[in-house]
Amino acid sequence: MSHPEYNVKVIGIIKTEFETSENTPIQPGFSQSIGRAIIQSEYVSGLKSLNTFSHIYLIYWFHKAKSPILLVTPYLDNEQHGLFATRAPARPNPIGISIVQLIRIENDTIVFKGADMLNNTPLLDIKPFARIFDYRENVRDGWLSGRDTEKALADNRFEA
């Protein structure tokens, strides 16, 4: 069975202090790092009213990801799990999603807190985080249940 391929448009570039995955926070909620998303001029008008939200989704391309591996041992575990049960960046479509705190918008630039992506990451889309749509009750954390941040904190993978 043949699967169609799709093209995506890069709408901007994300600038961060992180050049390699080492010492890059593993999730935005634990990062205090400031990042900037610089939007291409033809998409800047699409930022109108975005500044009324406190948080946004940044959807981006893991441009330095390795080839996908379907069974991985994730950072906070020593057992293998299926790729789709993890947030590993090496995926068939290396798409990343981060919920970050919007600090301000300056012309074509979104300044945000919670950078957990590499410098010069291609930005594919932006969506507002809306509690009315995005909040869920009775959430299960799967194999992550019972894990805490001590290992990541000890390894400096989360910024305190």
Image (spheres, rainbow, N blue to C red):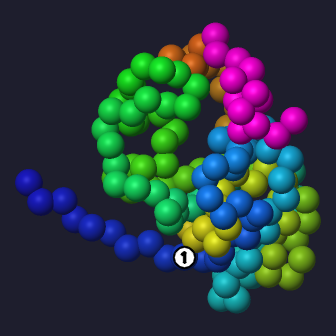
The residue at 32%/43% (across/down) is 69
Considering every residue shown, the one lying at the far bottom of the view is 41
Crowding at mark 1 (Cα within 10 Å: few <14, some 14-19, many 20+): some
- Residue 54, position in %: x, y? 86, 51
Q: Is residue 74 left or right of residue 28?
A: left
Find numbered disc 1 in the image and state the secondary structure of the residue it sits on: loop
Q: Main SS type for the magenta part?
A: loop
Q: Specify start and end residues of the magenta stretch as a single range.
A: 146-160
Q: Is residue 112 left or right of residue 126?
A: right
- Which of the 4 image quarters holds residue 132? top right
Task: Depth check: give the residue in front, 98 or 147.
Answer: 147
- Residue 28, position in %: x, y? 73, 45
In this rendering, is residue 32 above or below 155?
A: below
The residue at 52%/22% (across/down) is 77
Q: Does any portion of residue 101 appear in the rendered image? A: no
Q: Which residue is mark 1?
A: 10
- Residue 13, position in %: x, y? 65, 74
Q: Is residue 131 left or right of residue 74?
A: right
Task: Depth check: give the residue in front, 70 or 24.
Answer: 24
Task: Depth check: give the residue in front, 39 or 42.
Answer: 39
The residue at 49%/31% (across/down) is 74
In this rendering, is residue 117 above or below 141?
A: below
Please identify the quadrant where the C terminus is shown. top right
In this rendering, is residue 121 above or below 67?
A: below
- Residue 36, position in %: x, y? 79, 68
